Amino acid sequence: MRDALSKSARLAYFIFIFQYYEVDTEILVVVSFQVNMGFIFSKSMNENLKNQQEFMIMNSRLQLERQLLMQNQMRERQMAMQIAWTREFLKYFGAFSGLAAVGLTVGAIKRKKPAFFLPMVPLSFILAYQYDMGYGSLLKRMKSEAESILDTESTTLEMPKGPLTFESIEKARRAQSKFFIEK
């Protein structure tokens, strides 16, 4: 019986399985190592291998979800900073426009030339735009227009020559690399 056990142990073979799972834009490469001994142990090892592969897939999905959440939070923070910047700019520009309006009105009355009041026209448009951006509904209107474009005009958003591929990026990298040696 010992000889049979040692023969079966010697007949053990190893199989490397190369698998990849493509999850949206990330590729998870799983290299699994399978031991098949024709023994009771092989069944439990195969189960462990399957459990490990399932764990790796779940882990990659969790990582992708976290990355998407992080990107969304970063986008929200950037938008908040842009709105805050617009509101701050509006305070300074509003003060400038107010002083300009008073000065130009006084100048137009003193010199009896209404042309002095003309610069207030573009300044008022800029002030109205900044107010709408900071406190109004401009961002909501822009968002609804963007959603409309995504829904009805998606062909205008396509990249020239189609989406980026690994092959095109690798080709460009090889063309720029000084250290690449072609085999």
Image: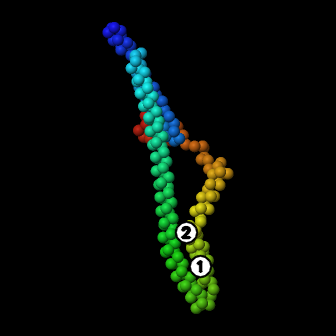
**Residue at screen point 55% across, 43% down:** 164
Q: Does residue 182 lie above or below 117 as drawn?
A: above
Task: Inspect this view and state whether residue 170 appears.
Answer: no
The three-letter amino acid code for the residue at tag 1 is Met
Q: Earlier in the sequence, mark 1 or mark 2?
A: 1
Disc 1 to disc 2, how far (Cα)?
21 Å
Q: According to the image, what is the colour scheme of the structure?
A: rainbow
Disc 1 crowd rating (10 Å Cα; few below 14, some 14-19, many 20+) is some
Disc 2 crowd rating (10 Å Cα; few below 14, some 14-19, many 20+) is few
| Quarter of image, res 112 | bottom right
Q: Does residue 173 lie above or below 16 as drawn?
A: below
The three-letter amino acid code for the residue at tag 2 is Tyr
**Residue at screen point 54% across, 85% down:** 103
Disc 1 is placed on an element classified as helix
Q: Disc 1 designates what residue?
A: 120
Q: Which residue is more in the foreground, 29 or 103? A: 29
Q: Decide: marks 1, 2 in contact (CB < 8 A)?
A: no
Looking at the rendered image, the quarter that the C terminus falls into is: top left
| Tag shown at residue 182 | none
Expressed as whole percent of the image width and height from the top left, the position of residue 126 reads: 58, 72
In the image, is 52 to the left or to the right of 97? Answer: left
**Residue at screen point 50% across, 55% down:** 75
Expressed as whole percent of the image width and height from the top left, the position of residue 73 reads: 48, 54
Expressed as whole percent of the image width and height from the top left, the position of residue 11 reads: 38, 13
Q: How many badges with numbers are in the image?
A: 2
Task: Inspect this view and state whether residue 85 appears.
Answer: yes
**Residue at screen point 54% across, 68% down:** 134
Q: Disc 2 designates what residue?
A: 135
